[in-house]
């Protein structure tokens, strides 16, 4: 099902790249980061090309909850303890600045996108998180933001304790971005859609960006692809995983909650009013492709929870999203590699892409212009310190070892006749493993069940009818067509 944002806007259309071209800056990925990076680079004397494998904003961007906030969970005490007070202060400053940047752009360009300042809250309903809430408020106030410890909210249930971040914001992200895209077009930015980039390599003193049919020669390349589509030498697949979460939009048929809320404890519950009629509730998150997770109950769990709070509610929209999470919980923004100049990335937003995308756009702009950016160092994309998170790094290695090795040689427990209609899975067929989906009419779709990124065995997602990679989060539809990076290739078909 489409998100509310998609259903209430008309997506602009652009042509497919059908020839070889030259450009100064090639931005791969036309989501919020790619679009805003192009916008920040307007009128700087560059020829800019923006390209995407799908349509404008058709990936993670269209499935956001669109909270514009510097309150990224219980993050600031962790940042101060792990990296120091100055680091935590710069992180807070950069995201508060991003809120002001969005507001300034809305006013400057006269964008009708329902932008509104509002407060944001983290709350807990358990004793376990009380001290963490108190520590967070103390840290944030020391860093310069006037946060407030609260015991009551506008939510229709009692809490133990919470944090109020004042003067945050919300908007309609696609109304905002579609207006920015109009401005890009008016300023001669070349925009191409349905043009999948499959390779980026050095060429002379610049880069060659290859699509399935054509090439782009560029001096600068920005990989705004959610997850970097180039593995080496950046090695970000060792420093990051992907996480899926689910959203319902309801008509509460009662007073709409004021402000924006997220729980401190897990499972996470997130609340965000759209207007006086609709309320977004999110949660049910898990690592992409994770074995043993009953994905099919994701929406049902949210709906059951919503019904308890709003007994007369009606579900209007359901959608899912996917986020990259770095091992040290800080985004990667800047140089892709120390040995490949003029190629940049922005990834690992950890569900907070509205502000972080604007932080990234400004840092990358300044890198290309040769200007110093005071926030560049804390988001440094080439850092390897993330690997010091031994627990998460160990979990990633174990999952990769299992999916790359053990699971491949382990025979499947299913055979074709075991699959019911409208279900799928990896089966044993004539001595080899095959990924099969049997549709509602019994028609069979068969693929080689190995990710085209690094070869991990895929898992079947029966809720969304997709093949998901448990190692690095690539996703494919039931026919094997690529949905989500870091893979750049479709799955091979299987004979059955």
Image (cartoon, rainbow, N blue to C red):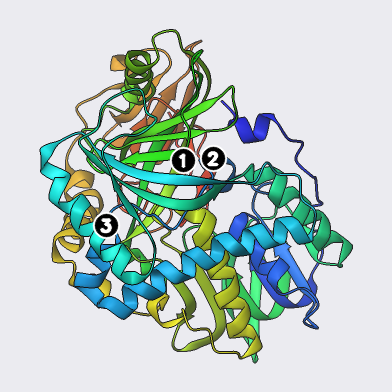
Q: Residues within 10 Å of mark 2 (few under 14, many from 20)?
A: many
Determine whether 298 is above or below 200 in the image. above
Residue at the left extreme, as displayed: 128
Q: Nearer the viewer, mark 3 or mark 2?
A: 3
Give the residue at x 77% y 55%.
181
> Residue 321 bears which disc, if any?
1
> Residue 63 bears which disc, if any?
2
Give the residue at x 16% y 45%.
129
- Residue 247 horizontal side relative to residue 134, left or right: right
Tell me the quadrant of the picture where the N terminus can be found.
top right
Give the residue at x 77% y 36%.
10
> Residue 137 bears which disc, if any?
3
Could you say where residue 139 lies in the image, as x and y percent from the top left?
A: 26, 65
Q: Which numbered disc, 3 or 2, marks the residue that appears first in the sequence?
A: 2
> Residue 280 bears which disc, if any?
none
Q: Residues within 10 Å of mark 1 (few under 14, many from 20)?
A: some
Q: CA distance from mark 1 to mark 2?
A: 6 Å
Query: Which quarter of the figure has residue 316?
Result: top right
């Amino acid at each position: 099902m489409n998100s509310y944002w998609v259903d209430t806007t008309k997506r602009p259309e652009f042509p497919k790249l059908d020839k070889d071209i030259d450009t100064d800056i090639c931005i791969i990925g036309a989501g919020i980061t790619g679009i805003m990076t192009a916008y920040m680079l307007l009128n700087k004397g560059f020829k800019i090309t923006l390209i995407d494998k799908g349509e404008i904003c058709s990936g993670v961007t269209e499935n956001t909850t669109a909270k514009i906030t510097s309150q990224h969970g219980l993050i600031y005490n962790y940042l101060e303890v792990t990296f120091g007070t100055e680091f935590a202060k710069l992180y807070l400053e950069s995201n508060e600045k991003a809120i002001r940047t969005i507001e300034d752009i809305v006013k400057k360009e006269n964008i009708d996108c329902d932008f509104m300042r509002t407060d944001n809250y983290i709350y807990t309903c358990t004793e376990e998180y009380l001290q963490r809430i108190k520590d967070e408020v103390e840290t944030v106030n020391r860093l310069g933001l006037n946060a407030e410890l609260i015991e009551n909210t506008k939510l229709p249930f009692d809490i133990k304790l919470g944090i109020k971040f004042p003067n945050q914001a919300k908007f309609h992200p696609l109304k905002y971005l579609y207006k920015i895209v109009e401005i890009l077009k008016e300023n001669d930015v070349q925009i191409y859609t349905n043009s999948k980039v499959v390779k980026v390599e050095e060429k002379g003193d610049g880069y060659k960006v290859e699509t399935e049919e054509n090439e782009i020669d560029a001096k600068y390349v920005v990989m705004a692809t959610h997850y970097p589509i180039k593995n080496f030498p950046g090695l970000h697949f060792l420093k990051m995983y992907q996480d899926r979460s689910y959203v319902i939009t309801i008509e509460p048929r009662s007073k709409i909650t004021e402000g924006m809320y997220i729980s401190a404890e897990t499972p996470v519950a997130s609340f965000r009013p759209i207007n006086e009629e609709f309320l977004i509730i999110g949660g049910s998150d898990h690592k992409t492709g994770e074995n043993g997770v009953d994905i099919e109950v994701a929406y049902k769990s949210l709906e059951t929870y919503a019904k308890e709070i709003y007994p007369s509610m009606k579900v209007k929209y359901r959608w899912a999203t996917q986020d990259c999470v770095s091992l040290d919980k800080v985004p990667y923004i800047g140089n892709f590699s120390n040995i490949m100049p003029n190629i940049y990335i922005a990834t690992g937003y950890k569900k907070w892409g509205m502000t972080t995308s604007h932080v990234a756009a400004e840092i990358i702009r300044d890198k290309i212009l040769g200007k110093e950016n005071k926030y560049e160092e804390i988001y440094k994309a080439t850092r390897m310190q993330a690997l010091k998170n031994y627990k998460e790094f160990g979990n990633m290695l174990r999952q990769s070892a299992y999916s790359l090795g053990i699971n491949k040689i382990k025979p499947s427990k299913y055979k074709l006749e075991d699959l019911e209609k409208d279900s799928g899975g990896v089966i044993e067929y004539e001595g080899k493993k095959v990924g099969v989906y049997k549709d509602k009419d019994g028609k069979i779709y068969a693929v080689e069940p190995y990710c085209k990124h690094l070869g991990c065995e895929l898992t079947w997602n029966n809720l969304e009818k997709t093949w998901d990679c448990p190692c690095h989060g690539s996703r494919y539809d039931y026919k094997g067509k690529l949905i989500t990076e870091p893979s750049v290739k479709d799955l091979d078909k299987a004979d059955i």
